[in-house]
């Protein structure tokens, strides 16, 4: 174990040397934010060219924008790699990517954001995740298509997927919703496997992974919005009655509708909790996992004892956080599916004697 830690520490030091990272110029905040934020290109690493300049190795992505001169479609590699004195990475058609201020990370024209439909890093990672998930599910479906119900249970990858599906359906969806749960199974299984796939691939530090999809609040907002719509359309008449005319003392609902207002606000706090819980947990996990190895560079100019001891601590903590994130990937997908099932079940619930 000692030799393993030492090798990992030496590997991180070698990466720092080969990528041209200098301790004096190292900015841990930029490294962490670069990983958890969206971008118009897919940054892989930095390297030092023959002239001694640090160059970013990045995968360019399509840019689709509408500016004052109309629609433009081009590659993000046409933007300059370094920002000018105004904090802008200049590009074609009088467009630029802002690196500072309120519009940091956005494509602007004369300092103002434009209508942006670009394939950003988060969108590209989602496309990859969805494609991979579809291939896995269709592969399993094709396996079942060639078998009979009387055949032996599957093993290997198909058996693993069946185990996950049965666990989610029998232990999460069915208890949470109750009678009539079957019609909600496709949606909730889609939520579970999409979130789980995005979380797992987000742990891979190189393409096609490294995307912080569920740590993007726009993604979690859409997922929570879908659950919100399903819950409201699944609500029974008793659900709406308990919101606008709950069974409480009359003074709590008339003439001042105190309880109806509280219940109505509760309609929106449930999906809000779904959105924030998934977003905050995944973003924080990614940020901590990336921040731990940064300790090596921050103490590089200190004494040898401090450097080696803190480097060992950072490597151990980074490994621990990565192992913990593997568990969190599953837990967060399970919790989102569980809470969605409970919210749907609560909306469909009918009190005893009111069938």
Image: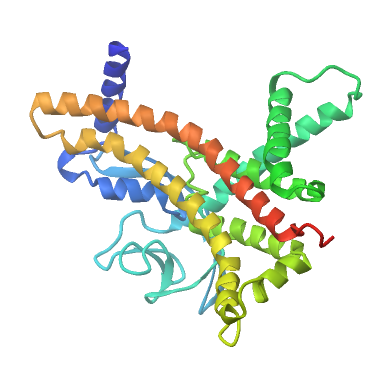
In the image, farthest residue toward the left: 303
The answer to which of 183 and 58 lies nearer the viewer is 183
Q: Is residue 11 visible?
A: yes
Q: Residue 186: where, in percent of width, then height?
A: 76, 46
- Residue displayed at 33% across by 62% down: 99
Q: Residue 93: where, in percent of width, then height?
A: 46, 70
Residue 227 occupies quadrant: bottom right
Residue 64 to residue 5: above or below: below
- Residue displayed at 49% across by 44% down: 211
- Residue displayed at 55% across by 78% down: 258
The answer to which of 284 and 302 lies nearer the viewer is 284
Residue 285 to residue 274: above or below: above
Q: Residue 31: where, in percent of width, then height?
A: 31, 46
Residue 334 occupies quadrant: top right
Q: Can residue 75 be seen in this view?
A: no
- Residue displayed at 56% across by 85% down: 256
Give the left or right position of residue 113, taking residue 158 as reference: left
Q: How is the image coloured?
A: rainbow
Q: In which quarter of the image is the N terminus?
A: top left
Q: Residue 223: where, in percent of width, then height?
A: 61, 56
Q: In which quarter of the image is the C terminus?
A: bottom right
């Amino acid at each position: 174990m000692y030799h393993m830690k030492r090798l990992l520490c030496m590997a991180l030091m070698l990466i720092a040397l080969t990528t041209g990272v200098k301790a004096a110029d190292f900015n841990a905040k930029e490294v962490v934010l670069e990983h958890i934020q969206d971008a118009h290109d897919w940054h892989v690493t930095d390297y030092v060219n023959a002239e001694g300049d640090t160059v970013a190795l990045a995968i360019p992505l399509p840019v689709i924008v509408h500016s004052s001169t109309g629609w433009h479609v081009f590659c993000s590699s046409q933007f300059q790699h370094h920002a000018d004195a105004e904090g802008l990475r200049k590009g074609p058609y009088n467009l630029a990517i802002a690196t500072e201020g309120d519009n940091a990370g956005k494509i602007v024209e004369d300092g103002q954001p434009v209508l942006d439909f670009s394939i950003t890093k988060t969108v590209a990672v989602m496309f990859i995740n969805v494609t991979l998930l579809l291939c896995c599910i269709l592969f399993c479906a094709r396996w079942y298509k060639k078998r009979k119900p009387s055949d032996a249970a599957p093993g290997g990858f198909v058996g693993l997927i069946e185990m996950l599906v049965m666990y989610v359906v029998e232990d999460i969806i069915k208890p949470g919703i109750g009678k009539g749960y079957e019609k909600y199974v496709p949606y909730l299984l889609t939520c579970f496997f999409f979130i789980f796939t995005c979380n797992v691939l987000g742990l891979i530090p190189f393409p096609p992974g490294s995307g912080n999809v569920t740590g993007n609040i726009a993604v979690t907002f859409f997922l929570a919005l879908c659950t919100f719509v399903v819950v409201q359309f699944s609500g029974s008449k008793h659900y709406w009655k308990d919101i606008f005319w709950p069974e409480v003392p009359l003074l709590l609902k008339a003439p001042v509708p105190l309880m109806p207002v509280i219940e109505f606000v509760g309609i929106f706090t449930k999906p809000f909790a779904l959105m924030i819980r998934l977003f905050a947990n995944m973003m924080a996990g990614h940020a901590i996992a990336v921040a731990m190895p940064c300790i090596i560079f921050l103490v590089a100019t200190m004494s040898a004892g401090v450097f080696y001891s803190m480097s060992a601590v950072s490597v151990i903590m980074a490994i621990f956080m990565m192992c913990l994130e593997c568990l969190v990937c599953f837990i967060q997908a399970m919790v989102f599916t569980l809470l969605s099932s409970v919210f749907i079940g609560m909306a469909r619930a009918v009190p005893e004697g009111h069938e």
